[in-house]
Amino acid sequence: MDEFMRKVQDRRIDSKYSLVRKLGEGGFGAVYLGRDFDTGEEVALKLEHRDQCPSILEEEVETYATFQGLPGFPEVYWYGWQDDYKVMVFELLGPSLEDLFVFCGRRFSLKTTIMIMDQLLLRLEALHSKGLLHRDVKPQNCLLGNGTNGNVVYVTDFGLAQEYAAKFDDFKEFPGRRSRLVGTARYASIRGHSGQVQSPGDDLESLGYMMIYFMRGGLPWQGLKAHSREEKDWLVKEKKIALGIEELCSGLPEEFAEYMRLVKSVQQEPVPNYTTLRDLFGRVARREAIEYDSVFDWTVRLYLQRAE
């Protein structure tokens, strides 16, 4: 049992939440499973030690507050101090898209991929309409809801979220200057690799890499050999720059390449046309007779498992 669990195991957080167990830990804090003592409802708790300065969790709470009540964004129940930790109590969600990807044999069907894209384009449109960028769009940060929201894809983890301006000026590259990756190398936009000022197009580029990952089972820059994390990030960036969109999307419906061309062309625009982007996948659905019925690959697999 870790230090925090030892301290609060016999007490309640905010006089009503008890801890059950740790769910995971990342660079900006730990997440626990908890329970509302009054209702019995399970909740999630995210912790950040007081030594973290500036507070990432405080900024994340402010971001969540912007989206309270909107579909696909977790509800925050409480935020405050417990001993040496800042604590956010929020809606407990289901598995991540990465978890479900592994469950489905590391490949999603065309139908599942375009239904995911349809939902996540709505989420990013809502996010960007509030003047915010996520800057770490990846399968691990997209989770299913629970109960009646079990087919709703949520966007979570706003630890790197940032406001954006109407105009974007790149940071100048100076000789010997080392760029700093913002986000996760596998899905980061090229500008994100370079530490440049980002726009909504960068989140959409990361989402594009996700859809290709789901369809192919991997991305061309996975598995590159390097002597350090910094060198690996640089190699991934160079591979993304060198690889053309046609090659990246080879064998996939033409609309996938068209999506990537569009999002790269709007890198400097404050408001992409999200309807146009969603319509691309709607075109694929009509051509392939795909119905947006919320029957995903994992839905079918779970049904078959239970039927055995």
Image: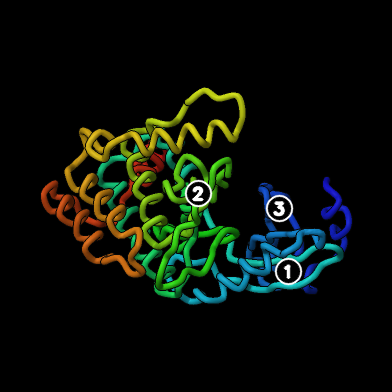
Q: Which of 206 and 155 is in front in this view?
A: 206
Determine the secondary structure under disc 1.
loop
Q: Nearer the viewer, mark 1 or mark 2?
A: 2
Residue linked to disc 3: 30
Q: Quadrant of the N terminus?
A: top right
Residue type at tag 3: Ala
Residue type at tag 2: Glu
Q: Position of residue 52 (x, y in %)?
A: 76, 59
Q: Distance from label 1 to label 2 (Cα)?
A: 54 Å
- On the picture, is 21 further left or further right than 44? right
Q: Earlier in the sequence, mark 1 or mark 2?
A: 1
Q: Where is residue 122 in the image (x, y as percent from the top left)?
A: 35, 65
**Residue 7 can be seen in this image:** yes
Q: Position of residue 144 (x, y in %)?
A: 46, 55
Q: Which of marks 3 and 1 is in front?
A: 3
- Number of other residues with Cα within 10 Å of mark 2, as a class: few under 14, some 14 to 19, many 20 or more: few
Residue type at tag 1: Phe
Residue at the spot 14% in from the left edge and 46% down from the top edge: 288
Q: Which of marks 3 and 1 is nearer the N terminus?
A: 3
Determine the secondary structure under disc 2.
loop
Q: Distance from label 2 to label 3 (Cα)?
A: 35 Å
Q: Position of residue 179 (x, y in %)?
A: 55, 45
- On the picture, is 252 further left or further right than 243? left
Task: Tell me, for residue 173, which label it has, or none.
Answer: 2
